[in-house]
Amino acid sequence: MKQKYQGNQRVQSAQLQRLRRDFEVLEMKEGEAIAKYFSRVMLVVNDMRNLGEEMADSKVVEKILRTLVEKFTYVVCAIEESNDIKDLTVDGLQSSLMVHEQKLIRHVGEEHALKIEGRWKSDGSRGRGSANFRGR
């Protein structure tokens, strides 16, 4: 059964080479959610593990930290400074990054609301002064 679905040794080796390359070139896309990126990474990692590749969690954690988008740079630095990366689990990293992502989303939403609120007055006019007085 195993050979039927995974193929012979040569086929497995070729699949593993393709998956290694996929793993190497994985990067988070701008605007991509943490959960979606982790899903993409873990799909490749699990396929590699199913074909017999020894893939430690620490290697996966290091890969993810290296390939996050720029807005997570200071969080990556904080995680690296406060934790031993070798002991950090993939799930632990994901939950930490998801909490930070939620804070970023909330902060951006509040900032956007403040910009809109400051731009328009309740009577529909813009800026300072009354609608009847235009300039000096």
Image (cartoon, rainbow, N blue to C red):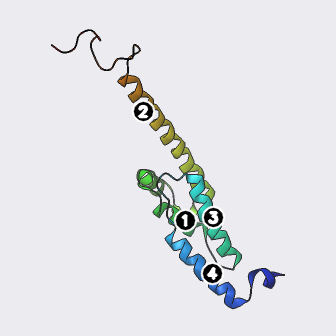
Sequence-first disc among 3 and 4: 4
Look at mark 3 in the image and give the residue it sits on.
42
State how far apart marks 1 and 2 are (Cα).
Answer: 37 Å
The correct choice, above or below, for 111 with respect to 127 in the image is below
Give the image location of residue 34, x and y in percent: 55, 53
The secondary element bearing badge 4 is classed as: helix
Q: Which residue is mark 4?
A: 16
N-terminal of the pair, mark 3 or mark 1, is: 3
Sequence-wise, the earlier of marks 2 and 4 is 4
Q: Which residue is mark 2?
A: 111
Tell me the kind of residue under disc 4. Answer: Leu
Local secondary structure at mark 3:
helix
Return the residue at label 1: 86
Residue 89 visible here: no
Quarter of the picture holding the N terminus: bottom right
Quick check: marks 3 and 1 in contact, CB under 8 Å?
no
Mark 3 vs mark 1, CA separation in Å: 18 Å
Q: Nearer the viewer, mark 3 or mark 2?
A: 2
CA distance separating discs 1 and 4: 24 Å
Camera-nearest residue between 34 and 32: 32
> Given the image, on which type of amino acid does mark 1 rest?
Lys
Q: Residue sitting at 71 percent across and 75 percent down?
A: 50
Give the Cα separation between the discs numbered 3 and 4: 15 Å
* SS at circle 1: helix
Query: Residue 132 in the image: x percent, y percent?
Result: 27, 9
Q: Quadrant of the C terminus?
A: top left
Please tell me which residue lies in front, 124 or 103.
Answer: 124
Q: Residues within 10 Å of mark 4 (few under 14, many from 20)?
A: many
Mark 3 neighbour class, 10 Å CA radius: few under 14, some 14 to 19, many 20 or more: some
Residue 42 in percent (x, y) is at 63, 64
Residue 100: numbered disc: none
